[in-house]
Amino acid sequence: MSISIGELARRTGVKVPTIRYYEGVGLLPTPARTEGRQRRFGVDEVARLNFIRHARELGFEVADIRELLTLSEQRERSCAEVDAIVHRHVENIDRRIEKLVALRAELQRSLDRCARGTIEECRVIKVLGYGYDRV
């Protein structure tokens, strides 16, 4: 099978500029090209791009995806390094969740204290620090 970049995009749900980006950062190998310089992709690239897309959907950074791809090619190796990458990612997610929960609580407090008056009295605007003392 030999498909164009447009067909690869259609089959994987990844936009053409993103495919080019992944190629540029080394997540996708440089594809074969036709005499007319058109990129041609095969089954392996479809599978690899699906892996990359799914990893990105789960929030993995490019460096982690690169490492996961490298490790995935070493099938007999212990999965301890993969586990470490995922564990680190989960910890990052937990930190983001904590920040989002705190952010939500602060915004909810602002809403709860809102007198529903004028913008001049708006608690949210005041909390954000955009005062009316500027002229």
Image (cartoon, rainbow, N blue to C red):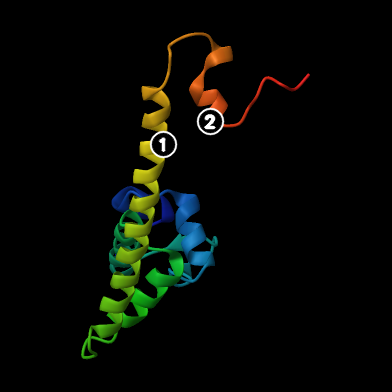
Quadrant where the image shows the C terminus = top right
- Which residue is label 2 attached to? 127
Count of labels in the image: 2
Of the residues shown, which amino acid type is indicated by label 2? Val
Q: Nearer the viewer, residue 110 or 34?
A: 110
Looking at the image, is 5 positioned above or below residue 114? below
| Quarter placement of the N terminus | bottom left
Would you identify the image quadrant in which residue 107 lies?
A: top left
Q: Tag 2's secondary structure?
A: helix
Whether residues under marks 2 and 1 lie with C-beta atoms below 8 angstroms apart, the answer is yes
Q: Position of residue 98 (x, y in %)?
A: 35, 52
Crowding near the residue tagged with mark 2, few <14, some 14–19, many ≥20 C-alpha atoms within 10 Å: few
Q: Tell me which label, 2 or 1, sits earlier in the chain.
A: 1
Q: Which mark is residue 52?
A: none
Q: Quadrant of residue 58?
A: bottom left
Q: Is residue 133 left or right of residue 128?
A: right
| Viewer-proximal residue among 54 and 33 | 54
What residue is disc 1 on?
106
What residue appears at the point 60 percent right and 31 percent down from the top-left corner?
129
Whether residue 3 is situated above or below residue 102 in the rendered picture:
below
x then y, percent, for residue 12 = 31, 53
What's the amino acid at mark 1? Glu
Q: Which sits in the foreground, 2 or 70? A: 70
The residue depicted at 44 percent of the width and 72 percent of the height is 29
Of all residues, the one furthest to the top in this rendering is 117
The Cα–Cα distance between marks 2 and 1, rounded to whole angstroms, is: 9 Å
The residue sitting at 42% across, 55% down in the picture is: 5
Residue displayed at 28% across by 87% down? 74
> In x, y percent, where is residue 101?
34, 44
Q: Is residue 113 visible?
A: yes
Q: Position of residue 120 (x, y in %)?
A: 58, 13
